[in-house]
Amino acid sequence: GAVVSQHPSRVICKSGTSVKIECRSLDFQATTMFWYRQFPKQSLMLMATSNEGSKATYEQGVEKDKFLINHASLTLSTLTVTSAHPEDSSFYICSARDQGAVETQYFGPGTRLLVL
Amino acid sequence: EDQVTQSPEALRLQEGESSSLNCSYTVSGLRGLFWYRQDPGKGPEFLFTLYSAGEEKEKERLKATLTKKESFLHITAPKPEDSATYLCAVSNAGNNRKLIWGLGTSLAVNP
């Protein structure tokens, strides 16, 4: 149980294009989903918290117009990197918190983004 | 300020050589302490949630314990497949219950 999927697992795009990453909770309902970014050999950096049916809460320093988050249902959240640039290349990971479990976050497998 | 510190930063063990990883924390109102395992290029894999001092949980060769100041992840007779980065995080009473992360312990188990 508590499986989270992400799609795509890897994407290469040209500078200036937009990329959408999907995060799905497969066997539970998630009222809250989180989006993280991870640089090589560093810990996870929280980008934003997404609550179903409401606007996402972004961490300080994260541009909300660049990283668009939509949490339209209890099982799906999307992150769109708009007008991507090489510095946006990174490993993006989502997590979902089971509304039935008090605190635990379950993570997706991650999406490797490379912007050329 | 809420903080999580993991030690050691890196650990190399021989197969079968038991050891412990440490996670020290300071947090206002602990709601939970979490252990995850992360393999290179993958998302963290959930291992344990501990809620109160004195609590212990086990899974195969891993055992997690919790006190009011720290948590230990004990690895008994590790195998090469236990090689990974082990991450510790805490959730506090406020702050939208976000996770506060340690930097992880990179474990290598040699055959």
Image (spheres, grey):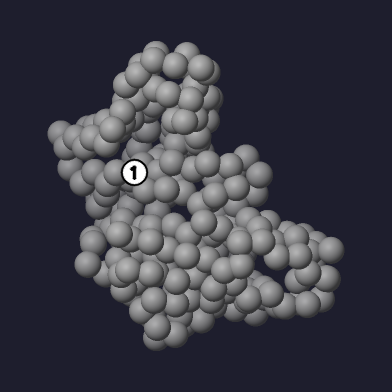
Does residue B58 show up? yes
Looking at the image, the residue that sits furthest to the left is B54
Does residue B89 show up? no
**What's the residue at 43%, 41% (across, down)?**
B37
Mark 1 surroundings: few (<14), some (14-19) or many (≥20) residues within 10 A: some
Q: Position of residue B102 (x, y in %)?
A: 46, 40
Count of marks, rendered view? 1
B30 left or right of A81 in image: left
Give the letter of the chain under mark 1: B
**What's the residue at 48%, 76% (across, down)?**
A77
Q: Position of residue A44 (x, y in %)?
A: 53, 50
Q: Position of residue A90 (x, y in %)?
A: 68, 56
Q: Nearer the viewer, residue A54 or B42?
A: B42
Q: Secondary structure at mark 1?
A: strand
Q: Which residue is mark 1?
A: B47
**What's the residue at 54%, 73% (across, down)?**
A22
Q: Is residue A87 above or below residue B56?
A: below
Q: Position of residue B15 (x, y in %)?
A: 44, 16
A75 left or right of B33 in image: right
**What's the residue at 36%, 33% (across, down)?**
B24
Quadrant of the rendered image containing residue A47 = bottom right
A15 left or right of B34 in image: right
* Amino acid bearing label 1: Leu
Q: Nearer the viewer, residue B82 or B106?
A: B82
Quadrant of the rendered image containing residue A105 = bottom left
Q: Is residue A60 above or below residue B92?
A: below
A116 left or right of A5 in image: right
